Amino acid sequence: MSNETLIEKYFSKSLTPNEALEFDKLYESDSDFKKDVDFLKKVKLVSEKEDDLQFKSQLKSYEDDYSEHDKKTTHKWLKPLIAAAGLILIMLSLNFFMNSKLDEDQLFSSYFEPSKNVTSPIIRSTDNETTVNNAFIAYSEADYKPAIVLFQKAYQDSKNSELLFYEANSLLAIDDYENAITKFEEHLKYSDILTNRSHWYLALAYIKTKQIEKAKQELKSLLNSDETFKRPEASSLLEKL
């Protein structure tokens, strides 16, 4: 069997046991064969990466590694494959840089929904016209601007730190990202049953404002806590950043 066929079957994962032994033997003893395989492994590795920020430097280094070898051996089957792989990687790189803003917006919209009220049951009665109750009524009806004002007043009156969490959610829901970040950061200074959940929403706010490293840190803080809220989503989102 030709070396070219062995390499093709290696990358398509269709080698028989005997062919695998022959492949391993050639890889150890034939320097040209090894360089061909190693180059294609590197191209495959880069093409599979989601985060392509280092694409240009990586591809350049791989081309430099291969250049001397390419002068000595000219496999007709290999050159078109290398050219095609390079073209695909260039297109992937251009797509990444041209659509990075769109990706951030899509990630945020895909993962964000305001938190449910798990703090205070709503009582719709004229006998219960408290600021907290009215705040949660407005919040449950997605009437976020009045809810923000009511949560602020309720917090001033009660100093219940959980209300900061809902105020921050309301701010995030009306696209006031900077103030939402400030409020989630304030909430994280307290220890209540919702504290760790603020890591999730703060990460989303950081993504929306293109502060990706901070978003990663918040997701890691959530995953390192005992909190079960949004754990699978946090893990999935972290892999995409």
Image (cartoon, helix red, strand yellow):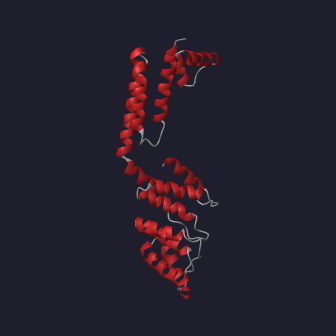
Whether residue 230 is visible: no
Which of the 4 image quadrants contains residue 190?
bottom right
Name the quarter where the N terminus is drawn.
top right
List x then y, in percent, for residue 65.
43, 26
Furthest-top residue in this view: 1
List x then y, in percent, for residue 93.
38, 39
List x then y, in percent, for residue 34.
52, 20
Q: Residue at x 45, y 75 (%)?
A: 148
| Total labels drawn | 0
Q: Is residue 229 above or below residue 128?
A: above
Q: Is residue 201 above or below residue 19?
A: below
Q: Which of the two residues, 221 or 14, is positioned nearer the viewer here?
A: 221
Q: Residue at x 56, y 71 (%)?
A: 117
Which of the 4 image quadrants contains residue 194?
bottom right
Whether residue 106 is visible: yes
List x then y, in percent, for residue 176.
40, 67
| Left or right of residue 131, residue 68 in this image | left
Q: Which of the two residues, 159 or 120, is positioned nearer the viewer here?
A: 159
